[in-house]
Amino acid sequence: MKKLIIAASCALAMASGVAQAQESSSVAEGTEPRHLRIAFDVPYEPFEYKDENGELTGFEVELADAMCEQMNASCQFVIQAWDGMIPGLLARKFDLIMSSMSITPERAERVLFSEPYYNTPGGWFGPESFDTDVTDMEAMEGKTVGVQRGTTMDTYVTEEMGGVVNIKRYTTADDMVLDLEGQRLDVVFVDYPVGEQTVLNKEGFKEVAEPVKLGEGVGVAMRKRDGEIAREVNEALRILKENGTYDAIMEKYFAYDIKM
Amino acid sequence: MPDFIAQWLNQNEIFTTMTLMEYWGGMVTTVQLVFLSLVIGLLVAVPLAILRTVRNPFVSGPVWFYTYIFRGTPLLIQLYIIYYGLAQIEGIQETFWWEIFREPFYPALLAFTLNTAAYTTEIIRGAIVSTPNGEIEAAKAYGMNWFMRMRRIVLPSAARRAVQAYSNEVIFMLHASAIASVVTIVDLTGAARNIYSRFYAPFDAFIFVALLYMLLTFALVFAFRKLENHLLKHQRPLNS
């Protein structure tokens, strides 16, 4: 009996969902606040992390808050490890990813991206004693470079320096920094703000080369079928970038420009 | 190469020659790591198991303590402690040890070996203590000394009793080796994770690697069945 009720209510929910979807174009905006679940992978300072009180905060979290308000949506924040980000989105565990996901053609096969909302360069960080020119392939021969698996920095190093350097891929930036400290790595190539927060905070490390602009920037990722939400997200982001809200949030967290 | 395989390779984006080579490299690393840790682990475990059965607590106690520690903590934690912990020791980078522990392979090999040696010690010890008294008494009656008794009676008979439990340990070790990928070793799982993160295709990347692990497991099961048939021949009914 219980199963029957569940099945019936599921069917009903689906039917009403379809009906809503069909109506939504005619219904006036703002009648029913849209409910959205947004996923973050923490900690990824200063984009998303927990403050001393355990509250979720950071650049993207605040931007998400502002975006939800602009869209008149009620939002719920979900913590999800990076490895399961896209699968979780596709499995409908949440509806949006706002966790510094760079737009790449491979990802765009699986998910729908909004317009980019920021872009940070990749930064080269290493010990004070490191004095090799990272763009000089002959000098870099045999060096060990650490990257975070699946990032645009990983793709860049794999494609540009694949046969030359020894690439080590890490799941978290923390593990990578530990190995840089332990001298297992000669140099790391990591998202600039992350390197700034982790490597440069330690004694004896420096930025060893100019930051490299990579990729098309970071966008909100959604399921392919959610074109309607994507349209609203783009609209909200456009307004936030124009009315100064975006700049205000950015200035809280960054000393440099990451706006796109 | 059969046509259908070539066709299938052409049709998909994920299983190109490059990714298949990555899987192959991972397979070689996994087999190396598991094989070496099992062989060294077994060589260490036999003497330890004998010491563990000695009555003197000053001899058996330390061995008991070692197996207790390594069976009482997760292999992942042991690997983290050995891999990251050793690198934190002041000045280790200047000693020759660093030549060995700089690469992730040797810390992982050390962790796996210590872990499997602990389990194997207990398996062999169990088999030794369950040696029928009659066999030992008969050996003594023949005037064999302790060493000869061990070599001719106790260990061969213990090996027969231990082989089934040990085959499980070998298979568990193969599966446990998947955690090597957390310390940047590109073993089978590491290759699958790299390919997964490149193509965002968890099913394809991980199901393929699961099949490879199953292939390895089947090979092990087959080898152990042959070994059991050989060792336990005397237990089979005559007309089979």
Image (tube, coloured by chain):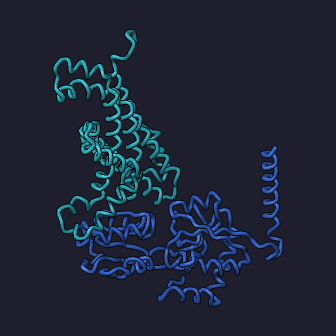
Query: Could you tell whether A86 is left or right of B96 in the image?
Result: right
- Compared with B12, B162 (above or below) is above
B75, A249: nearer the viewer: B75
Residue B133 point in image, percent of width and height: 30, 22
Tell me the quarter of the image containing the N terminus of chain B. top left
Residue A166 point in image, percent of width and height: 30, 63
Looking at this rendering, what residue extends furthest in the top direction? B239
Chain painted in cyan in the figure: B
Hue used for the chain lettered A: blue
Tell me the quarter of the image containing the C terminus of chain B. top left
Residue B88 point in image, percent of width and height: 30, 68
Q: Residue at x 51, y 65 (%)?
A: A105
Residue B223: tell me if it is visible. Answer: no
Q: Residue at x 29, y 56 (%)?
A: B107
Q: Residue at x 78, y 56 (%)?
A: A14
B208, B97: nearer the viewer: B97
Query: Could you tell whether A7 is left or right of A49 in the image?
Result: right
